[in-house]
Amino acid sequence: MQILKLGGRTLGFMSLRKVAIGISTLLILASFASFFVKGLNFGLDFTGGTAVEVGFAKPADIKKVRSVLAENGFADASVQLFGSSQEILVRLAPRGDDVKAEVIGNQVIDALKKADDSVVMRRIEFVGPSVGEDLKEQGGLAMLTALICILIYVAFRFEWRFAVGAVSALLHDVIITLGLFSALGLEFDLTILAAILAVIGYSLNDTIVVSDRIRENFRKVRIDDTIEIIDISLTQTLNRTLVTSITTILVLIALFAWGGQTIHGFATALLFGVFIGTYSSIYVASAVAIAMGVSKEDLIPEVIEKEGADLDAMP
């Protein structure tokens, strides 16, 4: 069989697997450290509370807005620009079950109008704390269920060592992406959770393509070196991986730059997730499978047994 090689040679991806695993380990540890020190900046979808979007006739002074709100009993308010320099988003923790979002919104507007008559309320949103807690629990359960289903599918479709490698790569992607949001203090809401699940799907697709080529080459390539066969497989799928990643990144860059504040976090999570997912499908999944001792015999035992029987039958 003629083996497709890049530039006439096979790239030695797995020669760098120890370095890659070391880098991944450091990133995962840094992510856990960030979780412990800063935690995730959960949005109102998870924490509950009131969000008030306010418009100004001219660029808003964030420091002045915070000062005005603090003077009027909203010292815990989170204030940030939203979409443009003339739009701000004020987030407030729940004030009690008997206080309606409209009342809080009006109080915020009245306080800001004392300093600037041009203030206009754009919208008010409210999420109860119990609803936010349920969403947090269900979101984590959805992610865990997805990983378990993937583990079962890959183990059945290929081999359990590849399944462990695939799930390790997915956990790697999720932890580091969440670590990025924690370190940068970016808001984590249901939109970001959807992006994380999309990253899992993207990374898994890439891993399945690579695993399928590895299994095919284990059966066809007359080489006993597992690492060399995996390098050949990764080289053969590299063009497909790059084309898929680049076209996806171009779309996400457009969403990130011009999609608006509403999907800014979603685009950020996916953009980073595509990078880290492509990396993990090449290095983490295959490196874990190698570390667990995957070999030709694990994927084609029936062929080995048949050949052995034929040799025994020979005179």
Image (cartoon, rainbow, N blue to C red):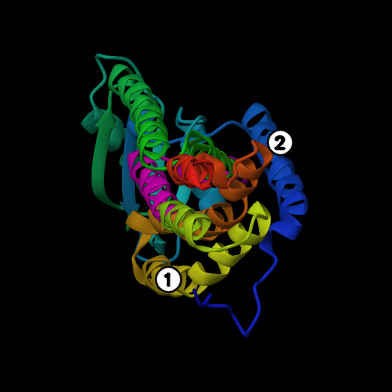
Give the quarter of the image for residue 267.
bottom left
State the predominant SS element of the stretch in magenta.
Answer: helix
Q: Is residue 281 above or below residue 9?
A: above
Residue 219 percent across, percent down from the top left: 48, 56
* Disc number for residue 257: 1
Distance, label 1 to label 2, CA atoms, is 31 Å
Residue, x 26% and y 49% (percent of image)? 121
Residue, x 38% and y 37% (percent of image)? 150
Q: Tell me, yes or no, if residue 35 can be seen here.
A: yes
Q: Tell me, yes or no, if residue 66 can be seen here.
A: no
Q: Is residue 255 above or below residue 209?
A: below
Residue 119 percent across, percent down from the top left: 32, 54
Element class at badge 1? helix
For the residue pair 96 and 200, the one nearer the viewer reads as 200
Q: Which residues are magenta?
A: 180-205
Task: Tell me which amino acid carries mark 1.
Answer: Ala
Task: Tell me which amino acid carries mark 2.
Answer: Leu
For the residue pair 65 and 124, the one nearer the viewer reads as 124
Q: Is residue 239 above or below residue 121?
A: below
Question: Is residue 184 magenta-colored?
Answer: yes
For the residue pair 185 and 165, the one nearer the viewer reads as 165
* Disc number for residue 29: 2
Residue 262 percent across, percent down from the top left: 33, 55
